Amino acid sequence: MNARTKKIASRILSVLGVIAFWIAVWFLLSWSVNSKFLLPSPKDTLIALGELISDGEFFLIAAITLGRIVLGVLISFILGIALAVLTEASKAAKALLSPALTVIKSTPVASFIILALLWIDRDLLPLFITSLIVVPIVWSNVAEGIRSVDKGLLQMAKVYRFSRLKRITALYIPTVAPYFLAACKSTLGLAWKAGISAEILCTPERAIGTELYFSKTYLETPALFAWTFVIILLSIAIEKLFVFGIGKLGSKLRVIR
Amino acid sequence: MLKFEKVSLTFKTEGREQHVLKDLSYTFETGRITAITGVSGIGKTTILNLAAGLLETSEGSVINTFAKTAYVFQEPRLLPWKTALENVTCVCGDEKKAKFYLDILLPEGSDKYPDELSGGMQQRVSIARAMAYDAELVLLDEALKGLDMQTKDAVVKTLREHLKGRTAIMITHDKSELEFCDTVLEISDAPISELKHVNR
Ligand SMILES: Nc1ncnc2c1ncn2[C@@H]1O[C@H](COP(=O)(O)OP(=O)(O)O)[C@@H](O)[C@H]1O
Ligand SMILES: [Mg+2]
């Protein structure tokens, strides 16, 4: 074994050790509580997970929730960028729209969910809630990125008569990209959690949130744990996938180093 | 033609006013190389920025009728996410031409990114960019400062050749650079109200 594989092996072992420790804690707690309804054991959870997966709807439900939130996030990215460009390009737009940013940022998500339940179709609501979380963050980050474009380079572009398109592709996009990516990274987890919270409150037909809601109502605590486990796994997977993909793309374009 | 007509310029920063130019009139000789010297902070860069249309006058006007203006800024001002070659190509729109000038000015490293180049190398990319742009008016702000001796000769030779028949303004403190300028102007008093010819 060379030093590198040794290092990797010891790292894997230490991660496994940490996981084993917490599962042991969980096991001991559930053993002392001794109630499947209050705190299911790791074994109960695993069985519930097996049941969930063997049920034909599992993947469909997970896919619908995932799809809905990803769609919401994509729409929000576009909207956030559009708003940032608009408010940085026009003083009037900024004056008009900035208060909205402040209000949305400081209103609790739950208030929006309850209000929106009155206005919006329950299948679309999680999408709307996701946007409320994601849009302001993307908006303010991208706006900051636009403002941070190097003044000296702007002068250079002016002297050498860069077209509008060239100014955008050679100057603005590379400058703003790291700001945008930082926003993406910090919103993905939030969007995922807020989207599922919204599903719990508005129970669309097929959704992880709806399943959570019914597991709670019928005191199927092992299923509640199993779904939570699925949510955590998906959340980690999305973030890792995104960060990995973007990191590759970004270093290829040399906008993140 | 490049002409300053009764130009005054006042910077206002934090409520404080600084008069940099006051009623300056000067017509730069077309097709000639003009050098400007003066202590730092007196307003030499400001004059080039006005000529390039990057600053508005407070009073008076700057008339620049040249079709294209190239500017070697006091700092390299390269796009950090583009290689040296891409930086030059991006401006002149012709990779062959960009290669031609970079081969002379930066024989090694045209595929490198600015942060992989030394300050002097970045400066040479900036000079190559200005030459490849093929402008009628060329502004050079201490363009040769900080270049090391071995490479400076090649740069000076190429630049001299390039500037033939073009109008150029060169800010410099270097005696050897003054040598190939047609006119040398000195700024001695602030705010700048005249550009004094230096007899050589
Ligand atoms: N954008 C600006 N805003 C405020 N003051 C400026 C600005 N640009 C230059 N100045 C001031 O004008 C004076 C002349 O600057 P500059 O033209 O850069 O001098 P030089 O190139 O001769 O060293 C300096 O005192 C500087 O502080
Ligand atoms: Mg200067």
Image (cartoon, coloured by chain):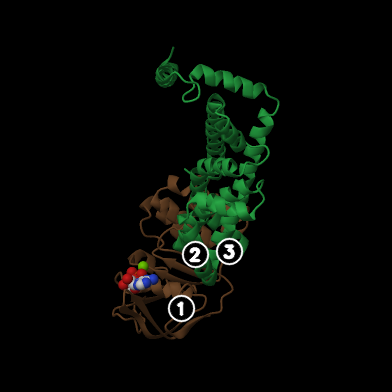
Chain bearing tag 1 is: B
Residue B19 x, y percent position in the rendering: 33, 81
Which numbered dot is residue A162? 3
Element carrying mark 2: helix
Q: Is residue A207 left or right of residue B154?
A: right
* Of the image marks 3 and 2, the number of the one nearer the N terminus: 2
- For marks 1 and 2, give the CA distance: 30 Å
Please state if B30 lies on the left or on the right of B185 as rendered: right
Q: Residues within 10 Å of mark 1 (few under 14, many from 20)?
A: some
Are the residues at dot 1 and dot 2 in contact (C-beta closer than 8 Å)? Answer: no
Q: Colour of chain A?
A: green
Camera-side residue of A210 and A194 = A210
Chain ID, mark 2: A
Amino acid under disc 1: Glu
Task: Give the crowd class for mark 3: few <14, some 14-19, many >=20 residues within 10 Å.
Answer: some
Expressed as whole percent of the image width and height from the top left, the position of residue A25 reads 39, 20
Q: Which residue carries the number 1 mark?
A: B56
Count of numbered marks? 3
Q: Residue at x 49, y 19 (%)?
A: A42
Label 1 and label 3: CA atoms lie apart by 20 Å
Chain B hue? brown
Res B100 seen here: no
* Residue B77 image offset from top left, x and y in percent: 45, 58
Q: Is residue A117 visible?
A: yes
Give residue A246's quadrant in the image: top right
Q: CA distance from mark 3 to mark 2?
A: 30 Å
Give how far across and how far down residue A91 sits, in percent. Answer: 51, 71
Chain on which label 3 sits: A
Mark 3 vs mark 2: tell me if same chain: yes
**A218 shown above or below B168:** above
On residue A240, the disc is none
Residue hosting label 2 = A98
